[in-house]
Amino acid sequence: MPAFTRNRNCLGVEFRMSVAHDMSGSFIIRQQCFQINLLDEAPFVDALTDYDRTHLITYLGLLDIVADKTPWHEAAAIILGIHAEDDEKRARRAYDTHLARAHWMSKKGHASLLRS
């Protein structure tokens, strides 16, 4: 049984780490990672979606990194895992639409989330 589990989103990859003790009392650290299913464009409807529920950490990360005045291309790489040097249009579209969705969630969508 894990002593604790931590989830982390970094470069568009979800990391799950758990720490437990083995029979001798030593620590065992297990780390799993899996790709987050990120769309190039976040949905924009006036209702909470399953996509929103899945990407709450992504939205919070974007709001946080924008508050730190991080340039958009760095934020897209760090939070969304999309590098502007590889595909600037895709990175910018994903950044803009996910940030807009993050703002919507912070103003309207969170109420639906709390009710559900």
Image: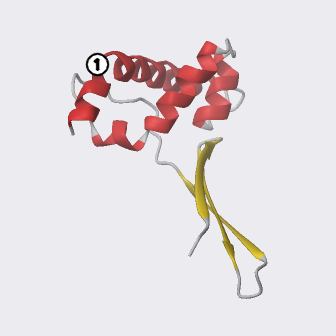
Q: Is residue 48 visible to us here?
A: no
**Closer to us: 102 or 41:** 102
Give x and y (percent) for residue 109: 29, 25
* In the rendered image, the vertical position of residue 20 relative to residue 42, given as above or below: below
Name the residue rendered at 61%, 33% in the picture: 79
Name the residue rendered at 48%, 20% in the picture: 99
* In the rendered image, the vertical position of residue 67 relative to residue 43, given as above or below: above
Q: Is residue 4 visible to us here?
A: yes
Colour convention: secondary structure
Name the residue rendered at 42%, 29% in the picture: 41
Q: Residues within 10 Å of mark 1 (few under 14, many from 20)?
A: some
SS label for mark 1? helix
Name the residue rendered at 55%, 53% in the picture: 35
Q: Which residue is mark 1?
A: 108
Q: Amino acid at mark 1?
A: Lys
Give x and y (percent) for residue 29: 72, 68
Side of 25 relative to 87 (left or right): right
Q: Quadrant of the N terminus?
A: bottom right
Q: Quadrant of the C terminus?
A: top left
